[in-house]
Amino acid sequence: MQNYSLTALVEREGSGYVSLCPELDVASQGDTVERATSNLKEAVELFLECASPEELLERMHSEVYVTRFEAVHA
């Protein structure tokens, strides 16, 4: 059994939330941030269970950086 430390990006969409794991390009959704994150974890675990080693290597982005920046609009 291998453990992965992955990223969850969560944003509001309409009345719910969408979650994304950018390392694997797996997404899910939920009514709350917590539910969207929990659903994403489940989706990632199902993906890891079903994916071939080749697919996992192909999709895994080992370096993902989350940062903020400011943009100016005139």
Image (spheres, rainbow, N blue to C red):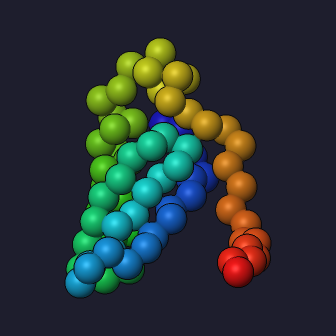
Residue 3 seen anywhere in this rendered image of the structure = no
Above or below, 39 relative to 24 = below
Image label count? 0
The image quadrant that residue 62 belongs to is top right
Q: Is residue 54 left or right of residue 5?
A: left
Q: Is residue 51 left or right of residue 60?
A: left
Q: Position of residue 61 (x, y in %)?
A: 61, 37
Q: Position of residue 29 (x, y in %)?
A: 28, 65
Above or below, 1 relative to 27 = above
Is 14 in front, or is 64? 14
Q: Residue at x 69, y 78 (%)?
A: 73
Is 56 in front, or is 66? 66
Q: Residue at x 56, y 58 (%)?
A: 7
Q: Residue furthest top?
A: 54
Q: Residue at x 44, y 21 (%)?
A: 55
The image quadrant that residue 42 belongs to is bottom left
Q: Residue at x 71, y 55 (%)?
A: 65
Residue 32 seen anywhere in this rendered image of the structure = yes
The image quadrant that residue 13 belongs to is bottom left
Is 38 in front, or is 16? 16
The quadrant the C terminus occupies is: bottom right
Q: Is residue 26 left or right of residue 60?
A: left
Q: Is residue 47 left or right of residue 8?
A: left
Above or below, 31 relative to 58 = below
Q: Position of residue 54 (x, y in %)?
A: 47, 15
